[in-house]
Amino acid sequence: MSFDTANTSASAATADAQDATPWVNAPDLRIFVIVLFFVFGGITSLNDVIIPKLKELFTLSYAQAMLVQSAFFAAYFVISLPGAAIVRRFGYMRTATIGLLTMTVGCLLFVPASASGAFIVFLGALFVLAAGITIVQVVTNPLISLLGHPRTAHSRLTFAQAFNSLGTTVFPYVGSILILGSLSTVDPKSLTGEALKAYRVAETHTVVTTYVGLALALALVAAVVWLRRNRIQDQHSHGGSILKAFELLRQTRFGWGALCIFLYVGAEVAIGSLLVNYLMQSDVLGLSAEAAGKHVPYYWGGALIGRFIGSIALRYISPGQVLAAVAAGAIGLIAYSANSLGATAAWTLLAVGLMNSIMFPTIFSLASEGLGVRAAEGSGVICVAIVGGALIPPATGALADAHGLAFALVLPALCYLVILAYGIYARRPAA
């Protein structure tokens, strides 16, 4: 990886330090980790599909519907540091198995959620599912950095995240057919009592079928990962309270990076969650729910393409400079979409996915430079910051309720503005 000429000596010093960082050459394990990125990315993106489904069934406002994301991403706030503690106790591969089994339980909880016909029970199932995803993500981010030479960590994490984006591209398209394709023509506002409950149970059957299928697949992946549990000797810290991980926030580069993860995830999730309703507007595309849902993969597909391109570009260009450039691009696209109509408004907002592409892995790797054996702790803290996905979407939804969907996009734009500033700050290698 090369940086601008003024940073040559700093880069050399950083490279020397990176050469001394322990790493493992295990191509087969990289494949398993990439599969994990694919799985948890795809399941997370299904929220964008079930939000309009639950909004219709439970006659929710935008702000209320966004509680789906709040329940899901609140798990990152609650579970991330315990997840890092589990890594310290059991190692990466065993912890990944624990996370996958927790995800399996979360998927199976959609069965009683549907039987209850209650929105809050769906939120509980989503929280458990997200708890498992959180544990897996605490494992995968530092593990993919460990499985290869430190000099190419930025590129390798971005490449792995591309398969995360592949999941977020495939799952919403299939989910829109399985879930949104069955939106009823019955107005739930016209039903009460047992009739309303029976209607909700019947209409959520497709949701249950989808998540039970996912549970079976997750159990299979968990078994495969468990069989590989002794493939690496973990490099992680065992002593002290896991809460000491928050001491890392005193480092400006890491603390600001954690803030940017909070803002990035919040902005990305807020836009993705509103896309179906945004495209359904008569002054945008005026699509049905299912047709609008089939456009969501373009948003996540942009991230997929951008990550493959970024994994190459980051070998030659300063990651901070690339981050600043794509953040500026996201701001420009949002501004253009909010002030446009028709197809222009639709496709400029969908194109924000391309700008999102390298943000998470680049912010993560920039913030984590030099953490060494504290990498799992740093990953835990950064995963706590993913709680931005629980807080920013409801705030965006409240803006949409009050002023319309186009105006609400100003909040994600402000998030990207802070990320742009961080990219400029972190354009030089860590000292």
Image: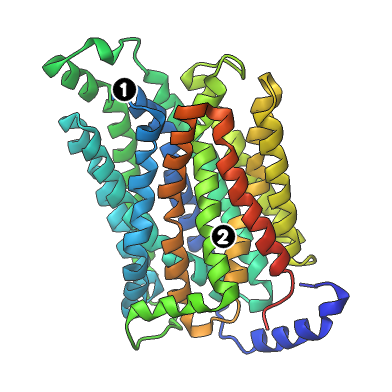
Name which of mark 1 and mark 2 comes first in the sequence: 1
Q: Is residue 290 above or below residue 185?
A: below
**Mark 1 and mark 2 residues within 8 Å of each other at the beta carbon:** no
- Most extreme residue toward the right is 5
Identify the secondary structure beneath mark 1: loop
Quickly name the residue at label 2: 260
- Coloured how? rainbow
Element at label 2: helix
**Relative to 396, residue 131 above or below:** below
Q: From the viewer's perspective, tell me whether residue 98 is left or right of residue 198.
A: right
Please tell me in which quadrant of the rendered image residue 3 appears: bottom right
For the N terminus, the quadrant is bottom right
Mark 1 burial class by Cα count in 10 Å: few <14, some 14-19, many 20+? some
Q: Is residue 357 visible?
A: no
**Where is residue 281, by image quadrant?**
top right
Residue 365 disc label: none
Picture residue at 34% right of the left edge, 68% below the top: 83
The residue that appears at 48% across and 49% down in the rendered structure is: 41
Say what amino acid the circle numbered 1 marks.
Thr
Is 343 left, or right, of 48 in this rendering? Answer: right
Can you identify the residue that label 1 sits on?
59
Three-letter amino acid code of the residue under disc 2: Cys
Q: Position of residue 395 (x, y in %)?
A: 45, 41
* Percent position of residue 271, x then y: 54, 38
- In percent of width and height, residue 20 lies at 62, 90
Q: Does any portion of residue 431 appear in the rendered image?
A: yes
Residue 86, position as x, y percentages in the image: 32, 73
The foreground one among 400 and 123 is: 400
Left or right of 276, for residue 89: left
